Image (spheres, helix red, strand yellow):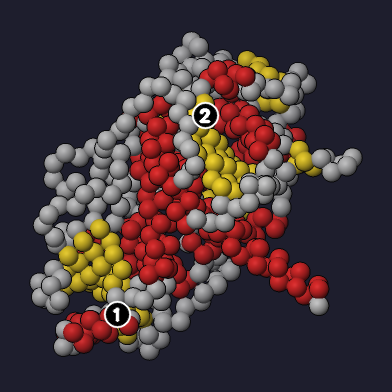
Amino acid sequence: MACVFLITKTQAISKWVILLKQPQTSNTGLVVGVYDGSDGNQELTEAGERLNEQSNGIIKELVKKQHIPLGRAEVYSGLGILGYNHIAVASVGPRNPNKLNLFEQLNEEKENIRVGMAVGARRVQDEGANRIYVDGVTVPEAAAEGSILGTYQYKANITTGDKYNPTVELYEHADTTSWASGEINAEAQNWARFLSHAPPNLKKPALLANEIMEKLCRYDIRVDLRNREWMALRKMTATLSLIKSSCDPPILVELSYCGDDPKTKPIVLVGKGNVFDSGGLFLKPYKGIHEFRADMGGAAAIVATMMGVARKRLPLNLRAVVLLYETMPSPMGLKPGDVVKNKHGTHIRISNPDNDCRVVLADVINFTEYYSPSLIIDVGTFTKSIAHSLGLVATGVFTGSTALWNEMQRAGLETGDRVWRMPLWKYFKSLNSMSASVDMDNGTNPKGGDACQAAAFLQEFVPVEAHCCCPTFLPHIHIDCFNTGLLSQTNEEIEPYYRAGIKMGRPTRTLIQFLYHRACLLPKTKQAVKAVHKK
């Protein structure tokens, strides 16, 4: 596929890479797992038993001296076993965990492995290891995700000292395919983390657009960069009115991946890409405003998902639209009470210029009707209230389809990056249109439910699919990742595979898993149903 360059001034960011070249001197580490037996005894995994044999029983003797609970690892350095400088033994929980815990919405087997390998890899990394070998246990995919996510640190702007993230590899396991899948998932999410964590002056719309283009063109993804004039011709007037406060012009990025019959309708992903949200004339408080460099966390998750899907070569058609822009205090910005009109003639009062995302994403979502999509998924860091409701544990999902929710819920269950369904009732729609003087208002009604009001606002602009005389909205999922895409964990961490203070890049892996289910599992289910009907 071709890459289309519509911006003549390109600025490459040489430091923007995730995996840097490793130093010549190698300091190796190894992580193996240990099961927590029901009788209090601990049993080494298969890889651990092999290591124990090669060490003449030293590993087992060391483990017997102390109990290692889930979430902990013990490091033994200087043992001289097989040339490893540091060996970590990490707990992976019980031997036969609950693979499908519906109450916790977790595959506990996978999550225990992620946690164990993340803790172990970080322990040997802290000891100085720059090449780490990891026990795949029973699910190498989960081991790869935990260890690669757990050892990631943002180091793009460091010139001295430890400038490198370690290389992580599978240790003596036959299922290299599963490991490769987890490696792709983790590296995609780490790219989203990298983009979100980068300082705002290094990801102006033009810079970020070119970084996306340079990265994704490697994987046969078509990239089109659209300028302000192009958007004006598509009558995105409400958006252009709202984002004119910055001196840096907006750029709309279109991404196309074709893995299925070209006639098959694509799934369309939409990402919010505000590279720095100052709040405009509703300037945010100085405390915490630096966090809003990650207000493009939705866009980061979308482009990272595209990379993951392309690297896995999933058999589906996928389109993505990401609008990169910046909101700054400026006399060019909209004032509270201004009214804008979109291409369908809907008048929207801008009661709160800081709620730019509702108006911007509404225009972009409506534009996706051009692709004749089978499903639209929009992702953005929308409302602080979703963080108040869910903390950092789960991402908020809004959809009118229970079937789609079940698919997304299962994806979150498998990845450990959980989601939670929030209401999308008509009541919240009514709160956006209570004014007698305009059609809609982008402000938050004081009756509450800010995140639900934002979702209901966007729902009004989802393209309509005509069925005879009964037009209906196209299938749509809205994901509010303010808590999981914009915020960072503190030292009291929720999951040990995210370091404190570094953006999490969620829900990238959940989106990849959701698309994997639709591409690889649902078609088989439908074929089986058809076969039963034929009989």
In x, y percent, where is residue 167? 25, 58
For the image shown, how many numbered marks are present on the structure?
2
Residue 436, above or below 1: above
Report the quarter where the C terminus lies. bottom right
In x, y percent, where is residue 335? 56, 15
Residue 312, above or below 209: below
Image quadrant assignment for residue 43:
bottom left
Q: Is residue 323 visible?
A: yes
Residue pointed to by mark 1:
47
Image quadrant assignment for residue 62:
bottom left
User: Is residue 329 found left or right of 157 in the rendered image?
Assistant: right
In x, y percent, where is residue 71? 34, 68
Residue pointed to by mark 2:
252
Which residue shows up at 38% across the image and 89% down it? 39
Which residue shows up at 48% across the image and 38% down it? 2
Residue 239, above or below 307: above
Number of the front mark, 1 or 2: 2
Q: Secondary structure at mark 2?
A: strand
